[in-house]
Amino acid sequence: MSIKVQGLSKTYAKQTAVNNISFTANSGRIVGFLGPNGAGKSTTMKMLTGYLQPSAGSVELCGLDVQAQPVAIKKLMGYLPEHTPLYTDMYVQEFLSFVASTYGLQNADEKVKQTIQKVGLQAEQHKKIAMLSKGYKQRVGLAQAIIHDPQVLILDEPTSGLDPNQLTDIRTLIKTLGKDKTVILSTHIMQEVEALCDDVIILHQGKIVANQSLDSLKNEQGDFSLEQIFRKLTASTTN
Ligand SMILES: Nc1ncnc2c1ncn2[C@@H]1O[C@H](COP(=O)(O)OP(=O)(O)OP(=O)(O)O)[C@@H](O)[C@H]1O
């Protein structure tokens, strides 16, 4: 099992953003992490990657505790945050070489070249990151997440800001990556979930309201579209 989350909670001051959630995810599966704005998706993803300390509960990636082994964890997983913190004064190639060096990668130049090709940054590689359009900055974010070939990929809204052509390219890439990795991705685009995901976790007000394969969720809910199912499961306001 690549990801094991048990009793995970996060409270910011008085607000409970994530409320005692547990789930697992396996290699070779792409998990869609869905929920309305403010449901707790980004907060959960930050805890999965060790960037945020949970208020309670634990996360294991490939058998390692995220809090106890933060350095080992970084090598196992790639993370594309919602707002990618890029070194915007660096050139694309220079930045990716820097990232490769932080992982101590062998054949770093070759890895940088391959990654630039994978995410379609060839034409932009000699530009400063600050000069790139939003969609291309997103590609640099994705490149830094995959350059070390991690077993687990956590992608927070990976296709936000991409034009329709870029969307197709990046979805194809994520689908390919998902064949031998565990991918958790958040998105608000139901079409994307249909196109990419094997499994779906829906969060609502910090709690899990659905956690199953996409097929079983759709079968269970009869003739409803995924959008209708999402609305039904996230309609109540109990807080
Ligand atoms: N640093 C913070 N301090 C206080 N509250 C926070 C902080 N970060 C997030 N929250 C709150 O926690 C809740 C969950 O936020 P989170 O960003 O995890 O939601 P989300 O599901 O990713 O939303 P979106 O789809 O809008 O990106 C929200 O109510 C948010 O206002």
Image (cartoon, rainbow, N blue to C red):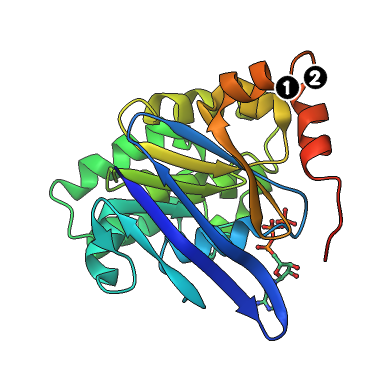
Relative image position of residue 61 (x, y in whole percent): 31, 54
Relative image position of residue 99 (x, y in whole percent): 33, 59
What amino acid type is highlighted by mark number 1? Gln
- Quarter assignment of residue 189: top right
Q: Quadrant of the C terminus?
A: bottom right
**Label 1, residues with CA under 10 Å away: few <14, some 14-19, many ≥20:** few
Q: Residue at x 58, y 25 (%)?
A: 214
Q: Residue at x 70, y 24 (%)?
A: 191
Would you say residue 98 is visible in this rendering?
yes
Residue 45 against residue 180 in the figure, above or below? below
Q: Which mark is residue 221?
A: 1
**Label 2, residues with CA under 10 Å away: few <14, some 14-19, many ≥20:** few
What amino acid type is highlighted by mark number 2? Phe
**Circle 2: element type:** loop
- Describe residue 138's horizontal placement relative to residue 108 as left or right: right
Relative image position of residue 24 (x, y in whole percent): 41, 45
Residue 65 against residue 152 in the figure, above or below? below
Q: Residue at x 68, y 73 (%)?
A: 16
Q: Which mark is residue 4?
A: none
- Describe residue 65's horizontal placement relative to residue 44 as left or right: left
Can you name the residue that lies furthest to the bottom here? 13
